[in-house]
């Protein structure tokens, strides 16, 4: 399922940036805590998302910005948002 909700996308772009910074490479799969509407919250339960970048040149540009830090990587991700798509994996 392709993610289109602007609020969810903002969180996914941020998580994508953070994971790339930690792992020092562009990651094709990221994890986010599950949304819980009530009751006790189990923090170890996560939802997996596939990350698709539809242009190899853009993927290389994003990767080149990883070593430049959070602000530069964030700016690159912002610039290329239209080429980054997140798909929620089915349980």
Image (cartoon, rainbow, N blue to C red):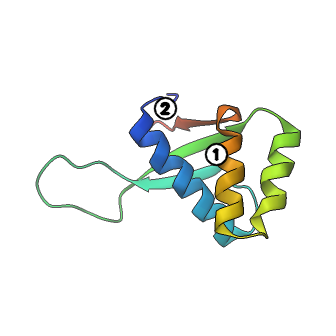
Label 1 near label 2: C-beta < 8 Å? Answer: no
Q: Which mark is residue 38?
A: none
Question: At x 48% / y 45%, what residue is drawn?
Answer: 10
Instruction: Kindly identify which residue carries mark 2.
Output: 3
User: Where residue 66 sits in the image (x, y, percent)?
Assistant: 76, 64
How crowded pointer 1 is (Cα within 10 Å; few <14, some 14-19, many 20+) is rated as some
Residue 34 vertical placement versus 24 (above, below):
above
Exactly how many numbered labels are in the figure?
A: 2
How crowded pointer 2 is (Cα within 10 Å; few <14, some 14-19, many 20+) is rated as few
Q: Is residue 63 left or right of residue 2?
A: right
Q: Say whether residue 28 is visible.
A: no
Question: At x 67% / y 48%, what residue is drawn?
Answer: 77
Please identify, in this view, whether the residue under mark 2 or under mark 1 is nearer the observer. 1
- Marks 2/1: CA distance? 16 Å
Question: At x 58% / y 64%, what residue is drawn?
Answer: 18
User: Where residue 70 sits in the image (x, y, percent)?
Assistant: 64, 67
Residue 85 vertical placement versus 47 (above, below):
above
Q: Nearer the viewer, residue 36 or 54?
A: 54
Instruction: Kindly identify which residue carries mark 1.
Output: 78
User: Where residue 61 sits in the image (x, y, percent)?
Assistant: 84, 50
User: Where residue 49 sits in the image (x, y, percent)?
Assistant: 54, 44
Which quadrant, please, contains the C terminus? Answer: top left
- Badge 1 marks a residue whose secondary structure is helix
Disc with the residue nearer the chain's start (2 vs 1): 2
Residue furthest left as drawn: 39
Q: Is residue 13 left or right of residue 6?
A: right
Q: Nearer the viewer, residue 10 or 89?
A: 10
Q: Is residue 20 left or right of residue 43?
A: right
Q: Say whether residue 63 is visible.
A: yes
- Badge 2 marks a residue whose secondary structure is loop
Residue 7 vertical placement versus 17 (above, below):
above
Residue 13 vertical placement versus 81 (above, below):
below
């Amino acid at each position: 399922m392709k993610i289109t909700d602007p609020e969810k996308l903002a969180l996914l772009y941020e998580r994508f940036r953070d994971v790339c910074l930690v792992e020092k490479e562009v990651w094709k799969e990221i994890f986010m805590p599950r949304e819980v509407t009530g009751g006790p919250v189990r923090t170890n339960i996560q939802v997996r998302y596939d990350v698709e970048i539809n242009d190899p040149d853009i993927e290389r540009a994003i990767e080149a910005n990883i070593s430049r830090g959070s602000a530069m990587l964030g700016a690159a991700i912002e610039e290329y948002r239209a080429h980054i798509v997140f798909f929620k994996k089915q349980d």
